[in-house]
Amino acid sequence: MNAEFDYMLKRTVRGVMSRREFMGRASAMGISAAMASTLLASAARAEGPVKGGVLKAGVSGGESTNSLDPAVAASPAPFAVSMLWGEMLVIVNEKGEVDPRIAEEISSNADATEWKFKIRSGVEFHDGKTVTAEDVVATLKRHTDEKAQSGALGIVQGISEMMAEGDMVTLKLASANADLPFLLADYHLQIQPGGGYDNPNAGIGAGPYKVVSFEPGVRAVFERHANYFDSSIGHADGAEILVINDNTARTAALQSGQVHMINRVDPKIVELLKGMPGMSIERAAGRGHYVFIMHADTAPFDNNDLRMALKYAINRQEMVDKILGGFGSVGNDFPINAAYPYFDASIPQREFDLAKAAEHYKKSGHDGSPIILRTAPGAFPGAVEAAQLFQQSAAAAGIPLEVKVEPDDGYWSNVWNVEPFCASYWGGRPVQDQMYSTAYASTADWNDTRFKNARFDELLVAARGELDGEKRKAMYSEMAYLVRDEGGLICPMFNEFVEARREEVGGWFVDPTHELMNGRALAKCWLTA
Amino acid sequence: MHPILKMVAQRVALGLLLLLAVSLLIFLGTEALPGDVAQAILGQSATPEALANMREALGLNQPAYIRYFQWLGGILTGDFGVALTNGQDIGQAIGQRLGNTLFLAACAAAISVPLAILLGLVAARYNGRWPDKVISGITLSTISLPEFVAAYFVIFLLTQVIPIFQPVAMVFPGMSFLDRLQAVALPVIVLVLVVLAHMMRMTRAAILNVMQSAYIETAELKGLSPMRVIWQHAFPNAIAPIISVVVLNLAYLVVGVVVVEVVFGYNALGQYLVDHVAKRDLPVVQAVGLIFAAVYIGLNILADVISIIANPRLRHPK
């Protein structure tokens, strides 16, 4: 790159030259817009963070029923709030690796049944106390208590013994699990003083920002935690999370500068936003996926030919284009994609094939009565439309699907995991084992496809304790084939996190772990102007 | 006892009785919702054990009538209880949000009521001529717009085209009065647009009705100016129907503006209620429902009393 371009780049990063002017001049020099944009982003990061200011995020997915208790956080706003005030033992980084946080070193015995976490010295809670191994153990213990209603209950239940000794936390597992560090990066497991037993809603943790005020479903205000152990994040003096559930208002708030970044941009308006000066669209391909699930033990779905017929009769690419607006990728009827470690990319993509669908349907001997597919607007964004598309393409193969739209109210209690065929979604999990254990093991409570396969269960347990990467990958591959070719899951698409930020936000990078840079966007970004 | 005082006392007593009936209806209504609280709180990720524990902890295993009387007893002693979902004290949360609701309603009323009456008087004065037609045309088209369309329109116009206001209207403790006014500007504009027509048309109709009377003709024949005839002779006799429609709209501004609240992210009671309905947080739903009912009944009593006071025949019954 020549000297003039470098000069322009520096001026733009410092805000002397506008982005628009920079892009214009770059294209005049024969540099593609995508290239110029990439160079600009890396230059902005190289320039280094700017301290000060108050960063604000407009977040969809908060209710006045929320609390600060990290155990019960479930929607996007409480997630983002807890990732700012809280700190965990470890975190999954943007490359899908485990980064140490409160734990400084992690080690396990040879068969992955006993794990040791060395607690970083001098990490301070917002109330001035130092984080100890006892706090860590107490936190994990609180989540094992069913009364805490923790979203991480399933994770901590697998730990049979927890011990704190000096600066060392030792966790003994009931059965081997090579993925334990990934599981402990679950966002419910924010370390709290004394485990949060006294007041789980206190909002006191060891994270980069302290809670100044919190009004559920409205706003959370933060100030920087001056004694935070990691000086590489936490640049702004303060941060705010505003809950703006309405798409239009959230977008308008970003445009008018009332907030600096928003989550969940409506795919329909991405193109419009892109064209506006000072806006940047950020996409991250995560592990979340939208599904249609059949109970493999209930007629007529207990017939694998019928299941295969339906799997061939869905037009995945059309769904990605029309339901996700192109912001996603096609699924392959197992819940894993390239965002997971040990993903086998050689598994052939299942194509939309009406002839095969018709053939399997005929072979299934189904009587031709309508097959009822239940859906609801809240099953996933666009779930009703997706079901209708499915109905159309199935009809072309001679399969009589009937779409029944259910109310959002009570959908998760009356339809999902109850009715034999319905629309749903999964947010994904950091590792394959957790995803499969949660929803595909024969004994799992949320086995929402009633998939019961002895060979699969056997592989699941074996892979969990397997420390040899190659062998493990082969096992996961075999499991993927089992779910794909025999299971009750129709997975048409993996969705992306589509977010937007203003140009004055520096330091943004793609983190597919969870939305808003795994909830840390407000801590890792900075205000350039 | 003065007949008016007696009447007021009767109305209030009736209102309280009505409120009791409403409380029962609210309770039965929330009982009839599909799904249960525990499932709604824990969502898609609920295990059977967690559900059972939650039901136990929330006291959902008790029969409904026992829960009703426990709740009613709490309300009568000023204890609304705590929200099932996040353990917040309901009385406290409602207090703050009710303040926000009333602030928004008061701002919208302060603009819309005088404006609607004034426009109604003008429309009546120029009955059938162009000012009447313009006023009716504009107000009828604003009332015909769904609230969220009007809201998106003002967001577009006043934050994007002419960026003078902020699209998100949240208010917080510690904000100055002027900041609050600035924050609620857009929702107030939308609410004014929505309620204007109803009150304006009623004012116009009531005045025109009175204008048929013989004494108006007398006043005109005395040579009084048309505006003076309307203001001094027609308006006082048309006040009863105008008051009742104004009060009806006030009640709407307090209890019926949840769509506007949601669009502008305004943290008031409507949104609070809807969030808790979705999570089956019965104590909150019942408390807010009761408050809304009380506001409605209270304002209706007020309307009755004012129209009786405004009417000499009712004020001095034989």
Image (cartoon, coloured by chain):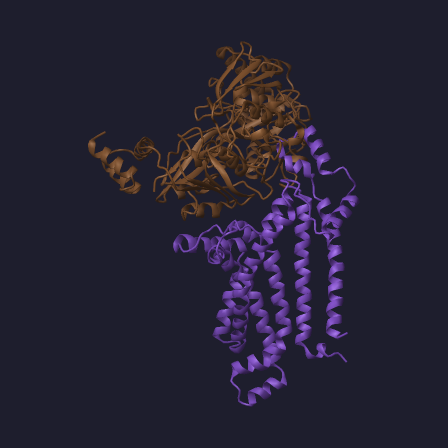
Chain colours: A brown, B purple
| Quadrant for the N terminus of chain A in the image | top left
Left or right of residue A214: residue B64: right
Query: Can residue A525 be seen here?
Result: yes
Query: Can residue A397 be seen here?
Result: no
Q: Residue B258 at x, y = what percent?
A: 58, 52
Quadrant in which residue A490 is drawn: top right
Q: Residue furthest left?
A: A3
Q: Is B39 placed above or below A182 here?
A: below
Marks counted in the figure total: 0
Residue at image coords 24%, 39%: A25
Q: Residue A161 at x, y = what percent?
A: 62, 17
In-front residue for pair A100/B60 = A100
In-front residue for pair A249/A180 = A180
Q: Residue A376 at x, y = what percent?
A: 60, 39
Q: Residue A135 at x, y = what percent?
A: 56, 26
Q: Residue furthest bottom?
A: B222
In-front residue for pair A30/A432 = A432
Residue at image coords 67%, 26%: A300
Quadrant in which residue B55 is drawn: top right
Q: Is B153 placed above or below A362 here?
A: below
Q: Is A438 placed above or below B198 here?
A: above
Q: Is A251 placed above or below B6 here?
A: above
| Quadrant for the C terminus of chain A in the image | top left
